[in-house]
Image (spheres, rainbow, N blue to C red):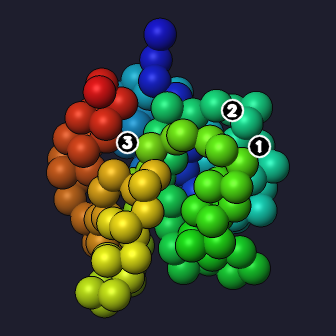
Amino acid sequence: MAKKIMIVDDEKIILEGIQLLLEMKEYDVVAIDNGSDCLKKIKAVDPDLLLLDILMPEMNGWEVLSKLATMNLDIPVIILTAKIQTIDKVIGRNNSLVREYITKPFNNEYLLEKIKNIVNE
């Protein structure tokens, strides 16, 4: 059975690009363009991995992570963001759900390797 990955990013080109990349590797992909919809759908989708952008309007990635913690969901997260400041990396890596913090632009092969390692744990 294919591993299910939820991608949350407000940039349509990034969302569609990652979705295509993962579908070519035969992952089951759910693409969502905002944090609020992510939280509404995450229990029903029950993904094996969440790829989460930080810089989004209305509800940013940090808020999504905070809400996930209150929902008692143990879904591993890879942060995909343009935020390269050390403080953001520290915050991300100190969250128990965050397994990787990858900055944009990223190498597709590197991303695929990290995804494979996490979903096959």
Which amino acid type is shown beneath numbered disc 3? Answer: Leu
Mark 1 in CB contact with mark 2 (< 8 angstroms): yes
- Determine whether, in the image, residue 37 is placed left or right of residue 51: right
Q: x%, y% of residue 5?
A: 50, 37
Count neighbours of disc 3 (C-alpha within 10 A) and say few if under 14, some if 14 to 19, many if 20 or more: some
Which one is closest to the eye, mark 3 or mark 2?
Answer: 2
Residue at the (33%, 66%) spot, across then down: 93
Q: Nearer the viewer, residue 26 or 77?
A: 77
Q: Which of the two labelled residues, at mark 3 and mark 2, occupies the earlier sequence position? A: 3
Amino acid carrying label 1: it is Lys
Q: CA distance from mark 1 to mark 3?
A: 22 Å
Return the x and y of residue 39 as percentages of the image width and height. Answer: 74, 53
Position above or below: 37 against 50:
below
For the C terminus, the quadrant is: top left
Q: Which residue is mark 2?
A: 45
* Residue 41 place in picture, x, y as percent: 76, 43
Q: Amino acid at mark 2?
A: Val
Q: Position of residue 30 (x, y in %)?
A: 61, 39
- Circle 1 residue: 41
Structural crowding at the residue carrying mark 2, measured as other residues with C-alpha within 10 Å and reported as few (<14), some (14–19) or many (≥20): some
Q: Which residue is disc 3 drawn over?
A: 21
Circle count: 3
* Helix, strand or loop status at disc 3: helix
